[in-house]
Image: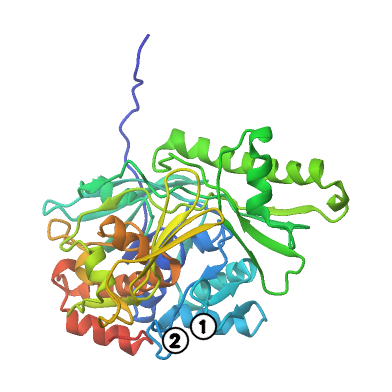
Amino acid sequence: MKTTVHEPARQTPVILDVDLCVLGGSCTGVFAAVRAARRGLRVALVEKQNRFGGVATCGLVCIWHNDLDDRYEEQIIGGLSLEMVDRLKRRDAVDVRERNPDARYVLNTEELTLELDELVRESGVTPFLHTYYCGASFREDGGVEAVFVENKDGRSAIRASVFVDATGDGDLAKDCRVPFSVRPDLQPPTTCAKIAGLEDLNMRAFYNEHREEFDVPKDAGWSCSIPNGAPVRVHAETHVFGANVADATQFTFAEMEGRRHIRAMMDMVRKHMPERRARLCLYDLSSSIGVRETRRFRAEHQLTETEVLHGVRFPDAIANGTYRVDIHYPEGGGHIFRYLDGREVSIRHNERKWSRWRPEGEDTALFYQIPYRSMVRRDCPNLIMAGRMIDADPGAYGAIRVMITMNQTGEAAGEAAALAQDGTPTWQIDPATLRERLSEGGSIMK
């Protein structure tokens, strides 16, 4: 039997010539597109889902973490993340939690979807939803000439001067042959759901008490109320362990397995707590599983856990953060947290073991930074990587991967793309000018 089929060669129409093409419509990608458009660039934004927002909207992950320093005294994050928070406040669609290391902003993700639509429209970005990136053509110098996309209109090409890969999995960077790694113990993905009727139940203990009966793994997660959503809560109670969702087969398995976990949770309650049946209701399932980690790509600089925990300052810093090093165990649920103040805790279900990664009494950092060099490579002269695919070791990645931090890499990518319009390779963008441009747009440069 033949193992291949012949696909005839064809000429692919160019449907758009722009200054910047952004692949991936998470908040990171949207913010890259909007910052560039505000600089006057013609921008295309390509997203495979039916909406913008990525894991926040399609994945129902409703939390943006801290925008203040580790003492909750000084603002360290601004820009479009805070602009979006202000827009949501006007619609009573965000709760602000003071001095909370787990969640500073809790978002109504449906309202966020609508606000992102409006932001894209206002900016003049050309959007493409339900559109898949599926390949690229290259210039003689190794730069990207155009990307191929497919949607209801068929296959076409978008040509641009600069490209931002905000796909999360680094789909364009992979085709550019940027070296990448996939760790054997990836932080596992989670399927989220909005459920009513579980608000006063210790779901972690209840789930593990009955999990064997329903053939689901031992696990531990979290849940959260949402603005004006009582009695509905977002539940992220389980993980799909061992799945690399940058692999198509494993991605399919993970989506279906994550939803099976949600059904098992519901059935546990129906069977063992029948008095709750009248108010138990599954309101929403994430349209895409919440991915924590897949490929990570090599750039001009790899951010390290040591640099994060010690708050190393970089001359080309484009993002700040305080979220702790957070590493999900690859099986059984639970986390390791390492805080900037030197504390460390291992959490396994209801057991917490505290220790320290550094001695008491030493000076501690109040925030850490991400350098622009972690987003670019000299052999990819018109590519910028943004979001969770950027170059970081496992510990650093465990800290920086959260949305409010990654959003800033998108803004930096948009501003850098504007500076590269004169032909300057993206890896040679002047960091002082880039930081000045970011500051002009509302970002906080320390």
Quadrant in the rendering for residue 114:
bottom right
Q: Is residue 92 left or right of residue 321?
A: right
The amino acid type found where label 2 is placed reads Tyr
Percent across and percent down for residue 66 are 46, 77
Closest to the observer, 319 or 132: 319
Within-10-Å neighbours for mark 2: few <14, some 14–19, many 20+: some
Q: Quadrant of the N terminus?
A: top left
Residue lying at 31% horizontally and 87% vertically, measured from the top left: 439
Near-viewer residue (211 or 295) = 211
The residues tagged by marks 1 and 2 sit, at their Cα atoms, a distance apart of: 6 Å
Residue 165 in view (yes/no): no
| Badge number at residue 99 | 1
Q: Quadrant of residue 197?
A: bottom right
Asked if the residue at tag 2 contacts the one at tag 1, i.e. Cβ–Cβ closer than 8 Å, the answer is yes
Where residue 61 appears, as percent x and y from the top left, is: 55, 62
Q: Which mark is residue 72?
A: 2
Helix, strand or loop status at disc 1: loop
Local SS, label 2: loop
Whichever of labels 1 and 2 marks the residue nearer the N terminus, that label is 2
Position of residue 110 measured from the top left corner of the image (x, y, whole percent): 64, 66
* Residue visible at 24% across and 74% down in the picture: 310
**Residue 402's spot in the image, x, y percent?**
42, 65
Residue drawn where x is 63% and y is 57% of the image? 235
Q: Amino acid at mark 1?
A: Arg
Q: Which labelled disc corresponds to residue 360?
A: none
Q: Is residue 23 left or right of residue 257?
A: left
Does residue 430 appear in this view?
Answer: yes
